Amino acid sequence: MRRAAGLVLGAAALALAGCDLFEASSPERAETDEGAAAPAASGAFRHSQSEDLSGFYTPVAETGDGEGRLLLVFIGQPADFEAWEKGPRDEGFAPILLEFAGGERVLPERYEVTDDRVRFSGTSEDLGRVTLEARLDGGALALARRNLGTDEEPAMEGTVTVGGRTHGGVKFAWSMGGG
């Protein structure tokens, strides 16, 4: 009987360990019972890129409308990610951020950046919850970098959600300048 219970508990632990640790609805800081802000759980910010992904990724087609129209996704260099993760953090800059037409910059509450995937979650007072789930195309990115971003295939494609409105199949061109 003990062995069966141990197997069940072990299976449950393995199932939990396999869960995706990136939870878009979890804020960076949580309120404690006393109402004070508690530090983010470790793992809220993860990066493991081996290639230089830095630059500006602009939607090929208009994405969103009004002040909620996405202008760009900025991705910094690995050193930017390392500095951000160690703190302290500048309120106007992050190693990955999304900028919108109304001038709103949404900074991350959580992110995961690898050579082939970008996941981002943040909140804006004006726009609400903002998420990005995208796949990077290493070959297209390398070509765009060699040609300085001139008329190349999109380097990233994914889904952007702004305040509950989802835009799928968004293609992003890479450039080294801000648009």
Image (cartoon, rainbow, N blue to C red):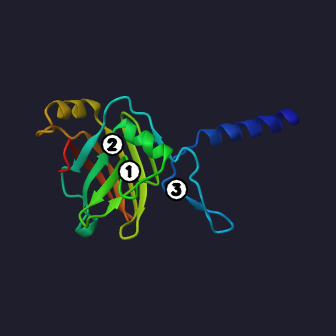
Q: Position of residue 143 (x, y in %)?
A: 19, 30
Q: To which residue does mark 3 refer?
A: 28
Toward the viewer: 37 or 145?
37
Label 3 vs label 1: CA separation?
A: 14 Å
Q: Position of residue 93 (x, y in %)?
A: 36, 53
The three-letter amino acid code for the residue at tag 1 is Ala
Quadrant of the snapshot with the N terminus = top right
- Quarter of image, res 134: top left
Q: To which residue does mark 1 refer?
A: 94
Q: Residue at x 76, y 40 (%)?
A: 9
Numbered circle sitting on residue 173: none
Discs 3/2, front: 2
Which of disc 1 and disc 2 is earlier in sequence? Answer: 2
Whether tag 2 and tag 1 are in contact, CB under 8 A, the answer is yes
Whether tag 3 and tag 2 are in contact, CB under 8 A, the answer is no
Q: Position of residue 141 (x, y in %)?
A: 24, 34
The image shows residue 62, relative to residue 6, as above or below, that is below
- Quarter of image, res 177: top left
Q: Residue at x 40, y 54 (%)?
A: 90
Judge left or right: residue 148 versus residue 42. left
Toward the viewer: 157 or 51?
51
Which of disc 2 and disc 3 is earlier in sequence? Answer: 3
Label 2 vs label 1: CA separation?
A: 8 Å
